């Protein structure tokens, strides 16, 4: 979700009733701390809920130093990523690649827990491959090392995001450990959430891709009323304004496109995507969408 769960997205989710938002995954390596991308990914505000910084890496001492620095800068929770299946992350022996070395996962968590006073959480997958679902082993080690909660995505590293999520491993983890276990993967409706919670006994659910272009979804799953189609359009415009404020010109208009495209698809207005993508300034983007809403959306 790096590149999507930026500060504007987290702000919208929190405002619309989401229970907690997690910052974009950022590398723990010290030479990345001051890069524009890493600095931007760590930006947070009180209008986006508690500050949760997500770190990725493979060296316990490096992650511990990064976590301590983030706590000093205001992080209220440190989240460790052992779930990302992206090749550029796994090729650096980070993310879900670490599921192949559960002992190292434990050493990383223990080092970070020792380094900071704020809660430390972790995200994992069910294992490396469908024939090697070692998520339960990793979960036990994570709990023993001091992780205070786990998010478990219902696919293995090899599965990436292909096929359906599998929840039996999450059920086994939830039954075995005492810390909260949050289920993740293919949860996009209230019915599916209830199904997953009943099947796993999980303490809650985490929403990722389903909330892109629908930042109201976590709040709806938490009991907020679903917004009308017109309200969804208003949310899109508000989100666009926050993104334009966050991403300065001259490149800001490009960075907002993926979010607006997701909104348009959810609104079944995909015929406007090509026209929107041709626009190269913030003001014209807003005008284009406002005119579209006046043309397409009834009161």
Image (cartoon, rainbow, N blue to C red):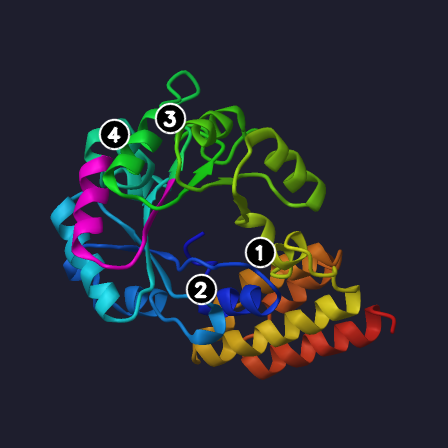
Q: What residue sits right under mark 4 in the picture?
A: 102
The numbered mark at residue 6 is 2
Q: Calculate the distance from the C-alpha at mark 4 to the C-alpha at mark 3.
A: 10 Å
| Residue 106 colored in magenta in the image | yes
Q: Earlier in the sequence, mark 3 or mark 1?
A: 3
Q: What residue sits right under mark 1 in the picture?
A: 212
- Classify 21 as above or below 72: above
Q: Calculate the distance from the C-alpha at mark 4 to the C-alpha at mark 1.
A: 32 Å
Q: Are marks 2 and 3 in contact (CB under 8 Å)?
A: no
Q: Calculate the distance from the C-alpha at mark 2 to the C-alpha at mark 1.
A: 11 Å
Q: What residue sits right under mark 3 in the picture?
A: 136
Provide the residue span drawn in magenta: 105-123
Q: Secondary structure at mark 2?
A: loop
Rendered residue at 38%/26% (across/down): 136
Q: Earlier in the sequence, mark 4 or mark 1?
A: 4
Q: Are marks 4 and 1 in contact (CB under 8 Å)?
A: no
Foreground disc of the pair 3, 1: 3
Rendered residue at 28%/59% (across/down): 118
The numbered mark at residue 162 is none
Q: Earlier in the sequence, mark 4 or mark 2?
A: 2
Quick check: can you spot residue 164? no
Q: Calculate the distance from the C-alpha at mark 3 to the C-alpha at mark 1.
A: 29 Å
Q: Earlier in the sequence, mark 2 or mark 3?
A: 2
User: Going by the image, does 174 lie left or right of 283?
Assistant: left
């Amino acid at each position: 979700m790096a590149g999507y769960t930026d500060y504007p997205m987290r702000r919208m989710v929190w405002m619309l009733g989401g229970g907690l938002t997690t910052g974009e995954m950022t590398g723990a390596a010290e030479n990345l701390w001051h890069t524009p991308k890493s600095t931007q990914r760590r930006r947070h505000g009180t209008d986006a809920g508690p500050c949760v910084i997500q770190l990725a890496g493979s060296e316990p001492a490096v992650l511990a130093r990064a976590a301590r620095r983030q706590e000093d800068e205001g992080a209220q929770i440190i989240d460790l990523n052992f779930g990302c299946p992206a090749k550029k992350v796994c090729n650096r022996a980070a993310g879900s690649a670490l599921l192949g070395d559960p002992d190292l996962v434990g050493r990383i968590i223990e080092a970070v827990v020792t380094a900071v006073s704020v809660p430390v959480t972790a995200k994992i997958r069910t294992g490396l491959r469908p024939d090697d679902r070692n998520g339960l082993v990793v979960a036990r080690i994570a709990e023993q090392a001091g992780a205070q909660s786990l998010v478990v995505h219902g696919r293995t590293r090899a599965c990436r995001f292909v096929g359906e999520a599998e929840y039996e491993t999450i059920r086994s983890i939830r039954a075995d450990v005492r810390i909260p276990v949050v289920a993740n993967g293919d949860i996009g409706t209230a019915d599916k959430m209830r199904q997953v919670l009943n099947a796993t006994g999980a303490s809650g659910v985490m929403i990722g891709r389903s909330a892109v272009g629908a930042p109201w979804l976590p709040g709806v799953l938490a009991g907020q009323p679903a917004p009308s189609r017109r309200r969804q359009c208003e949310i899109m415009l508000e989100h666009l304004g926050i993104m334009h404020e966050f991403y300065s010109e001259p490149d800001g208009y490009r960075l907002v496109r993926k979010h607006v495209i997701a909104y348009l698809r959810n609104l079944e207005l995909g015929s406007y995507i090509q026209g929107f993508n041709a626009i190269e300034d913030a003001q014209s983007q807003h005008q284009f969408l406002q005119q579209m809403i006046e043309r397409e959306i009834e009161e």
